[in-house]
Amino acid sequence: MSVASFAAVAPDRLAVVTGAAGGIGLAAARTFAEVGMRVVLVDRPGEALDEAIASIHGATALPADVADRATMDALARTVAEHHGPVSVLMNNAGIGAGGDVFEDAAAWDEVLGVNLFGVLNGVQAFVPAMIDADAPALIINTGSKQGITQPPGNTAYNVSKASVKALTEGLAYTLRERTGDRVSAHLLVPGFTWTGMTASRLSEKPAAAWTPEQVVTLMMERLARGDFYILCPDNETTLEQDAKRIAWAAGDLIENRPALSRWHPAWKDAFARFVQD
């Protein structure tokens, strides 16, 4: 697998990170800055963004709502005019709310607006210029294991992250057809990570959770290797366990089991045996 686009991660090149006021986005922005990149932090305005920009010397903060297409188009123009071509785009902004199928429509609109259309808006606003720049570039979209295995409980979030997976796979194909290996797309799939979303539910970091810095360290290693799927373990779940859960989820369709059979009373024992074998 080619790693040509990783040349985009280099001193004086520009990285744009959404959802950069905390969590994985902030850890990524700091890492890009540490390798000498110029960094633009994008997030909703507020104290968190102010504190984030103060912690990264030389970085720029541009408040924006990624769910608003016109705002993202204007943001891309501002970045191009004042900072130059983008080498790394990380569409990371996300929220955990949403709920199940019959949750209030406004909750669905919000989670899909940020988690799915925020990514699409970022891609459509920034990536055409990255293609035309005739230089190495890469795009990182933050997905979730929930978008692959679909655990019940928050269907809106699952739908948004499953859509990000499909969007990023399609983007990777299009970039490969248009640019060869010069511009590439990558899907970051974090495990259980201590971020603002988990902190809102828990008072302190669980032992099972990775830190955002651990996720970004692995992300950089896998980007350098040229991997498209950047699947992260955590302190509770190994990559081997993830592989079995993903394989079982795919088996629902292949074997025509009930939907989400991993949680079905008639199949949960079979799933347990599958994981143990």
Image: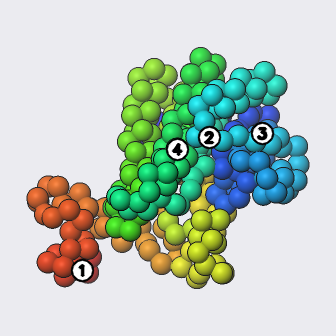
Residue 101's place in the image compared with 241, above or below, is above
Marks 2 and 1, how far apart in space? 40 Å
Q: Is residue 74 left or right of residue 33?
A: left
Give the number of the disc on residue 272: 1
Q: Position of residue 32 (x, y in %)?
A: 73, 47
Distance between mark 2 and mark 3 Cα atoms: 11 Å
Q: Please tell me which residue is depicted at 11% across the width and 59% down the height of the picture.
A: 255
Q: Quadrant of residue 261?
A: bottom left
Can residue 40 be seen here? The reply is: yes
* Circles 2 and 3 in contact, beta carbons < 8 Å: no
Element assignment for label 4 = helix
Q: Which residue is mark 2?
A: 66
Q: Amino acid at mark 3?
A: Leu
Counting every numbered tag in the picture gives 4
Q: Earlier in the sequence, mark 2 or mark 1?
A: 2
Q: How is the image coloured?
A: rainbow
Q: Amino acid at mark 1?
A: Ala
Residue marked by disc 3: 62
The N terminus - image quarter: top left
Residue at 46 percent across and 27 percent down: it is 175
**Mark positioned earlier in the residue sequence (1 or 3):** 3
Whole-number angstrom distance, CA of label 4 to CA of label 2: 8 Å
